[in-house]
Amino acid sequence: MSDIISRRGFITGAGTVLGAAAFAAPARAAAGPIAPGAHVSALVIGTGYGGAVAALRLAQAGVDVHMIEMGMAWDTPGSDGKIFCNTREPDYRSYWLRTRTKAPLNYFLGFPIDRDIPRHTGVLDAEEFGGITVYQGRGVGGGSLVNGGMAVTPKRENFGSVLPSVNADEMYNVYYPRANAGLGVATIDPAWFDTTPYYQYGRVGRKHAQRSGFPFVFVPDVYDWDYMKQEEAGTVTKSALAGEILYGNNHGKKTLQKTYLARAKATGRVTISPLHKVTSVAPASGGRYTVTIEQIDTTGNVTTTKTVTADRVFFAAGSVGTSKLLVRLKATGVLPSLNGEVGKGWGDNGNVMCGRANHLWDPTGSLQSAIPCCGIDNWAAGGAFAEVAPLPTGIETFASFYLSITRNPNRAQFSWNAAAGKVELNWQTAWKQPSIAMAKTIFDKINSKEGTIYRTDLFGVYKIWGDHLTYHPLGGAVLNKATDNYGRLHGYPGLYVIDGSLIPGNTTVNPFVTITALAERNIEQIIATDL
């Protein structure tokens, strides 16, 4: 679907869905960071997929919205003229309040590749819990700033296991198409894929998959594919073809800044306060909520604490952020009536990584686009889908690299540790073993067919599996358990969850299209019945 059709048609459609109020009253949203003592109609915590959808639809319905974002705005270039730094040269912009990088793939040829950096409110958070590191985007646009942009709608037959209480017909007829249109989803031109040197690694992945009898699929993405073709032609500044992905993409990727958030701000009713962190949401008189917010500087120090009042609060801080906040507020007696499901049902979307060492006659290319566009589907037979991922080192590696999504059944729980004064997650690294077994249903077979071996130099010394991380945190405030079937938190009218914490641990594919579509479904119902 063309971007022009989707944008114009969709805005028109949303107006009819949400009523004439979308275009009625004049805009009143104030500029600048939120003021102490302010009163706002709707306060949205977070600017990722769920929050961006909520802000746009509320604004179109005539509601003033203020969004609170812990990370930076990412709208000002650094001294090099670029907003984001390159994957191969991480600097102060790369990590969230760390003094050393923590790359998902942190060894190469057996040597550690992490480096010291200045402490700064960088774009990628590697948040460490007991048994897992959770990678999250920090900044206006949330995870859309740092992910690979793979925009996948789950297969219809798998949806029942993803969101069992949600009407699949509505999702596939209305809300998935709406989300895909709003996000600007498109698929690579197969003819260009077949010829460009930048996807040689993808073609090698296809050959190996098909020779072992696995279905190979092109995966939609939110990258501007026409821009990427111009990158190859040398007529625009290289972005994906310059290895930009892990720490932000400067040009071609359609992040939320360019889609939902741009349209939300264009209503004149949406204001965003970057470098602000919500620490409390407490009931106030008149059915409102008192929200406590810390303003921080770029080294993470609190410069001001503000208290504001909101008629309604939407939790959209991501699976980890929302879950941690709700668990703490329940345990410390601020929101004691939240039910016992808060904090439960958290999963890693079955993420596990691995690399394979290919033969010298099977080079994957020194030129690699950083944007993945294809995958291997063994979900039905082996419980695994593997994204053929780039390894954009700038040199020939003779390696195929994969991020797998698996049917891992294990779920963790967030809980409040009063002695330590923090929320903890009880995930155990051993719980990744089912993911490894499912991923092996693909890669053991390919290695056997091709006469190849696993790479042992990417995640440590003689370590094959990247079982220490997730890019896809899900759950912790599960739909129809911690909330009702549309994200309303039990016990507190006017409090809503509208992000990935609603989804119980797995989406069978990359999750952000499902998070977006679910948010579209829920906010439509909330606007129709609660406002």
Image (tube, helix red, strand yellow):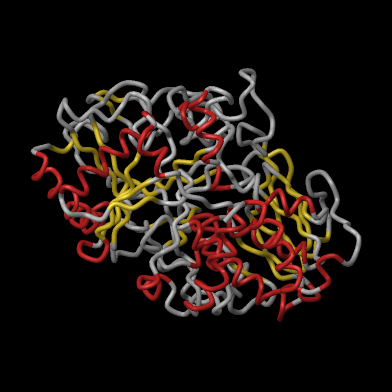
Residue at the farthest front position: 191
Residue 9 drawn at (x, y percent): 69, 62
Identify the residue at the far top of this view: 79
Q: Which of these two is toward me, 133 or 154? A: 154
400 relative position to 490: left or right: left
- Up/down of 186 relative to 464, above or below: below
Q: Quadrant of residue 159?
A: bottom left
The residue at the point 41 percent across, 23 percent down is 115
Please identify the quarter of the rendering in which residue 52 is found.
bottom right
Q: Quadrant of the N terminus?
A: bottom right
> How far across and down, in percent of the image, does residue 13 sit?
71, 68
Q: How many marks?
A: 0
Left or right: residue 445 versus residue 139 is: left
- The image shows residue 260 at horizontal and vertical percentages of 66, 53
Foreground of the two, 259 or 218: 218
Residue at position x 50%, y 39% in the image: 124
Could you say where residue 293 lies in the image, as x and y percent from the top left?
70, 51
Give the position of the C terminus as an image quadrant.
bottom right
Name, please, the residue furthest toward the right.
26
Measured along the vertical axis of the image, is residue 344 above or below residue 249? below
| Residue at image point 71% right, 48% down | 262
Q: Is residue 179 above or below residue 71?
A: below
Q: Nearer the viewer, residue 455 or 101?
A: 455
Is residue 350 rendered to the left or right of residue 237? left
Vertically, is 217 above or below 226? below
Q: In terms of depth relative to the viewer, which is nearer, 159 or 30?
A: 159
Q: Residue at x 83, y 53 (%)?
A: 268
